[in-house]
């Protein structure tokens, strides 16, 4: 009987430990999180997933003198019952909605430097995603 209680206790602890961790490729609603280029990210309820499909960075590099500060544009492919595209940028379109979901662009890093090319896979895009 003691073996049964020991096994039962172990199973309960394992169950709660698994529930504490987010699955890879998932995000939390309303929380600012970082996302990588060309990876799928799923909502906690699996009603939607998205991926970053393009990044266009025209920000003035550190160490340069520019007339305009520039901006960075991020293209999202959002999959619900249909597939839609959403563009966000740091200039005048930091947030937008698709269906019942709102996306807010918080930051894109790294910031460009003179004579240093950044590959798209090296960008990290910070977003807040809301279910509305």
Image (cartoon, grey):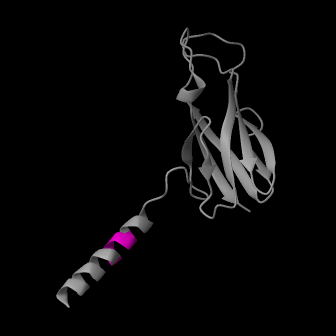
| Front residue of 129 and 48 | 48
Q: Position of residue 23 (x, y in %)?
A: 49, 56
Q: Position of residue 130 (x, y in %)?
A: 67, 57
| Front residue of 78 and 109 | 78
Please give the range of residues in magenta. 12-16
What residue do we see at 59% from left, 16% from top? 61
Residue 68: within the magenta? Answer: no
In the shown orientation, is residue 98 left or right of residue 20? right
Residue 59, compared with residue 80, is above or below; it is: above
Q: Quadrant of the C terminus?
A: bottom right
Q: Quadrant of the N terminus?
A: bottom left
What residue do we see at 79% from left, 57% from top? 81
Q: Quadrant of residue 53?
A: top right
Main secondary structure found in the magenta portion: helix
Check the image and name the residue furthest to the left.
Answer: 2
| Front residue of 42 and 34 | 42
In the shown orientation, is residue 72 left or right of residue 99? left
Q: Quadrant of residue 35?
A: top right
């Amino acid at each position: 009987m003691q073996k049964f209680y020991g096994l039962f206790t172990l199973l309960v602890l394992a169950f709660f430990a698994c529930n504490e961790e987010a699955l890879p490729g998932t995000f939390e609603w309303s929380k600012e999180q970082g996302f990588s280029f060309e990876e799928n990210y799923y909502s906690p309820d699996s009603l939607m997933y998205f991926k970053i499909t393009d990044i266009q960075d025209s920000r003035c590099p550190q160490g340069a003198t520019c007339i305009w500060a520039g901006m960075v544009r991020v293209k999202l492919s959002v999959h619900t019952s249909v597939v839609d595209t959403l563009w966000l940028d740091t200039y005048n379109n930091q947030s937008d909605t698709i269906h019942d979901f709102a996306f807010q662009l918080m930051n894109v890093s790294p910031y460009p430097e003179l004579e240093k090319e950044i590959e798209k896979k090296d960008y990290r895009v910070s977003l807040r995603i809301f279910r509305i």
